[in-house]
C-alpha cells in the first residue's frame, strides 16, 4: 500500500499490523508522562528566559555553531561573499577564541584554517579587547547574532540571526542541554534512584529515551527541509561514521557527494572509483608510494582513478588538518569508514533498502543482525585486511562495520529518521514501529560517557544494568536535562528531590492499599 512520505512524493511503505509493545511497567495516574513533567519546568524556564531577552546568550550561539544548525547552503559574510563552513572547529572551553581549528572558505578563494570568535554584536570584538590580544590573531571569522547596517567589522563576519535552520525557541529548547559530562562524584539522585522499584526506573528511562529519540528526529527534519529526506539520511549515516572528532569532515564529504538513488546500475561508478573520489576529496589519499607492497598496489589503483578527476574537484578538497586521529581505535580510522561509504554508494538504493528493512516483519532479537547484514559490505580486497595504509596485513579479515557500530547507527540515525518521516507523513503505525524497535534494540558497548552517567545517576558500575540501547539513551538524556545544569555537588538541581518525592508517594500509596 502506498503511503505519503511527507516530502511531496509517495513511497512504498507496507501496511503493518500495529506492533504490540512489550510491557514497560507503566503505572497509571501519578506516573503518566512523569519524566516529561519533571523536565518541563527547566524547559519552560529556558523558553521564558529567551522570550524575555532581546537576543540569545553567547553560550546558545556557541552551541548553534558547534552543531551547525544553520542553512549552510545560504551563508554569506557581511561583505557579500559566499561562505562555506568546511569544519566548525573544536569548542575551546579555556581562554581564547571560542572555536579552534575551524576551516572556512569565502567564495572561490582557497580554504582558510583558523579560529572562530562568537559575540552578540560586531562591537564585541573591540569591546572585549580581542583586537589587541595576541591569542586572537588567528581568528578567521567573527560570528555574531545581529549586525546592524552601520556595524564596523574589522575582519570577516557572519550574522546568524537570519541563517538559523529552525526557530530560535526550538533550538534553545534542544541545544540548551548539550554540554560536556559532569564530574566523577556520584550525584545526590543515585541513592533515591536505587531505592525505586525496577519497573518505575524503567518507566523514567523509557520517557527520557523517547524525548531523546524525538530530539534527534527533529534535527533530521530541519536538515531535510534544505536537502530532502534521503540526503539528510546519507549525511547522518556518514556523520555517525565519523565518531566524536570526525563528524563534520565526514558530513562534509557526504554533502559534496550526495546520494543519488535513481542512478541506473550500469552508470554507477565502481567501489574502487568511489573510494578514490571520497579519499581524494577528503584530503586523506596519500600522495606518495611509501608503504608496504600491498598498500602501494592499492594506492596505485586509487590514483589511476583519482588523477582523472582531481582537477575537477580541486576546489573542494578538504585540508588534511580537519581530521583528528589521536585516540582513535584502528577500526575507526576515517580512511576505512570512507571505504565503507564508497561501498554503500556503489551498491546503490541504500534508502530503499533501509525502507524495505524497516517495513519488514523481523523478530526483535534479529533486528541488529538484520541491519548489520544490510549495511555491512561483502568485503574489500584491501580494507578488509588493513586498518590503515600503513598497517600490516592482518592474519584474518575484519569487517568494515561491526555490531556495536550498527547499534549506534540505529538509535542515532536510522530509527530517528524513520520516526520523523512517519510523523511528517502522519503515519501513526510506522511511528509505532520506529519506537518499538528503538526500545527493544540491544544495548551498545559501554564507554566513558555511560560509565560516568551510571556513576552520577545509578551509583556506579554495580548499579542495576542498562539492558537496552534505549535505557542507555535515557540515562544520557537525564544527564543533559539535569546534571549539566548543576555542578558536581548537585547544587540547585531539582532531580534528586523529584525522585525522593516520587519514592515517598509510591510508599504512601502502597501503605494506603495495604490499609
Image: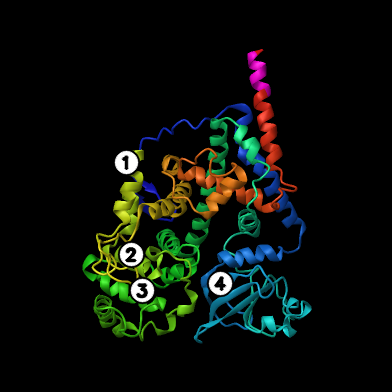
Look at mark 2 in the image and give the residue it sits on. 340
Mark closer to the chain start, 4 or 3: 4
Task: Give percent across and percent down for residue 417.
Answer: 45, 53
Q: Residue at x 66, y 62 (%)?
A: 60
Is mark 1 in CB contact (under 8 Å) with mark 2?
no
Is mark 4 in CB contact (under 8 Å) with mark 3?
no
Task: Give percent across and percent down for residue 25.
Answer: 52, 30
Pick the residue in front: 295 or 139: 295
C-alpha distance separating marks 2 and 3: 10 Å
Is mark 2 in CB contact (under 8 Å) with mark 3?
no
C-alpha distance separating marks 1 and 3: 34 Å
Residue neighbourhood size for the residue with mark 4, other residues' Cα within 10 Å, grouped as few (<14), some (14–19), many (≥20): many
Q: Residue at x 61, y 58 (%)?
A: 180
Q: Mark 3: which secondary structure?
A: helix
**What's the magenta region?**
508-514
- Above or below, 70 relative to 426: below
Mark closer to the chain start, 4 or 2: 4
Q: Mark 4: which secondary structure?
A: loop
Task: Give percent across and percent down for residue 139.
Answer: 63, 81
Mark closer to the chain start, 1 or 3: 3
Residue neighbourhood size for the residue with mark 3, other residues' Cα within 10 Å, grouped as few (<14), some (14–19), many (≥20): many
C-alpha distance separating marks 1 and 4: 40 Å
Q: Residue at x 37, y 71 (%)?
A: 335
Pick the residue in front: 191 or 401: 191
Q: Mark 1: which secondary structure?
A: loop
Residue neighbourhood size for the residue with mark 2, other residues' Cα within 10 Å, grouped as few (<14), some (14–19), many (≥20): many
C-alpha distance separating marks 4 and 3: 20 Å
Look at mark 1 in the image and give the residue it sits on. 362
Amino acid at each position: 500500500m502506498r503511503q505519503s512520505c511527507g516530502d511531496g512524493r509517495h513511497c512504498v511503505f507496507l501496511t503493518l499490523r500495529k506492533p504490540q509493545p512489550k510491557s514497560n511497567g507503566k503505572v497509571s495516574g501519578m506516573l503518566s508522562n512523569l519524566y516529561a513533567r519533571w523536565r518541563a519546568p527547566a524547559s519552560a524556564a529556558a523558553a521564558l528566559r529567551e522570550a524575555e531577552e532581546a537576543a540569545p546568550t553567547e553560550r546558545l550561539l556557541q552551541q548553534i555553531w558547534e552543531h551547525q544548525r544553520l542553512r549552510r547552503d545560504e551563508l554569506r559574510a557581511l561583505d557579500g561573499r559566499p561562505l562555506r563552513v568546511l569544519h566548525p572547529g573544536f569548542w575551546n572551553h579555556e581562554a581564547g577564541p571560542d572555536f579552534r581549528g575551524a576551516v572556512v572558505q569565502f567564495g572561490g578563494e582557497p580554504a582558510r584554517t583558523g579560529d572562530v570568535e562568537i559575540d552578540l554584536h560586531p562591537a564585541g570584538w573591540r569591546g572585549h579587547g580581542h583586537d589587541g590580544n595576541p591569542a586572537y590573531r588567528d581568528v578567521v571569522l567573527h560570528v555574531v547574532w545581529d549586525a546592524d547596517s552601520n556595524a564596523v567589522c574589522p575582519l570577516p563576519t557572519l550574522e546568524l540571526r537570519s541563517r538559523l535552520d529552525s526557530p530560535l525557541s526550538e533550538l534553545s529548547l534542544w541545544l540548551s542541554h548539550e554540554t560536556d559530562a559532569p564530574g566523577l562524584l556520584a550525584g545526590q539522585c543515585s541513592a533515591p534512584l536505587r531505592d525505586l522499584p525496577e519497573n518505575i526506573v524503567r518507566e523514567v528511562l523509557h520517557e527520557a529515551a523517547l524525548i531523546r529519540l524525538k530530539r534527534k528526529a527533529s534535527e533530521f527534519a530541519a536538515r531535510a527541509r534544505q536537502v530532502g529526506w534521503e540526503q539528510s539520511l546519507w549525511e547522518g549515516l556518514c556523520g555517525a561514521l565519523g565518531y566524536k572528532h570526525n563528524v563534520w569532515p565526514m558530513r562534509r564529504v557526504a554533502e559534496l557527494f550526495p546520494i543519488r538513488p535513481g542512478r541506473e546500475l550500469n552508470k554507477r561508478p565502481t567501489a574502487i572509483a568511489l573510494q578514490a573520489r571520497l579519499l581524494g576529496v577528503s584530503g586523506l589519499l596519500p600522495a606518495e608510494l611509501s608503504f608496504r607492497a600491498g598498500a602501494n598496489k592499492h594506492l596505485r589503483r586509487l590514483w589511476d582513478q583519482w588523477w582523472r578527476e582531481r582537477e575537477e574537484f580541486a576546489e573542494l578538497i578538504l585540508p588534511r588538518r580537519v581530521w583528528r586521529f589521536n585516540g582513535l581505535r584502528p577500526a575507526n580510522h576515517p580512511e576505512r569508514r570512507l571505504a565503507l561509504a564508497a561501498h554503500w554508494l556503489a551498491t546503490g538504493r541504500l534508502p530503499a533498502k533501509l525502507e524495505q528493512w524497516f517495513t519488514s516483519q523481523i523478530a526483535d532479537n534479529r533486528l541488529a543482525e538484520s541491519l548489520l547484514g544490510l549495511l555491512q559490505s561483502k568485503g574489500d580486497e584491501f580494507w578488509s585486511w588493513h586498518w590503515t595504509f600503513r598497517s600490516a596485513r592482518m592474519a584474518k579479515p575484519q569487517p568494515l562495520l561491526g555490531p556495536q557500530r550498527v547499534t549506534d547507527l540505529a538509535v542515532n540515525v536510522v530509527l530517528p529518521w524513520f520516526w520523523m518521516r512517519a510523523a511528517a507523513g502522519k503515519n501513526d503505525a510506522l511511528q509505532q514501529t520506529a519506537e518499538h524497535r528503538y526500545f527493544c534494540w540491544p544495548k551498545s558497548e559501554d564507554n566513558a560517557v555511560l560509565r560516568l552517567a551510571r556513576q552520577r545517576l545509578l551509583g556506579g558500575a554495580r548499579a542495576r544494568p542498562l539492558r537496552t540501547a534505549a535505557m542507555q539513551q535515557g540515562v544520557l538524556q537525564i544527564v543533559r536535562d539535569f546534571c549539566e545544569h548543576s555542578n558536581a555537588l548537585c547544587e540547585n538541581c531539582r532531580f534528586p528531590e523529584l525522585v525522593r518525592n516520587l519514592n515517598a508517594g509510591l510508599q504512601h500509596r502502597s501503605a494506603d492499599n495495604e490499609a
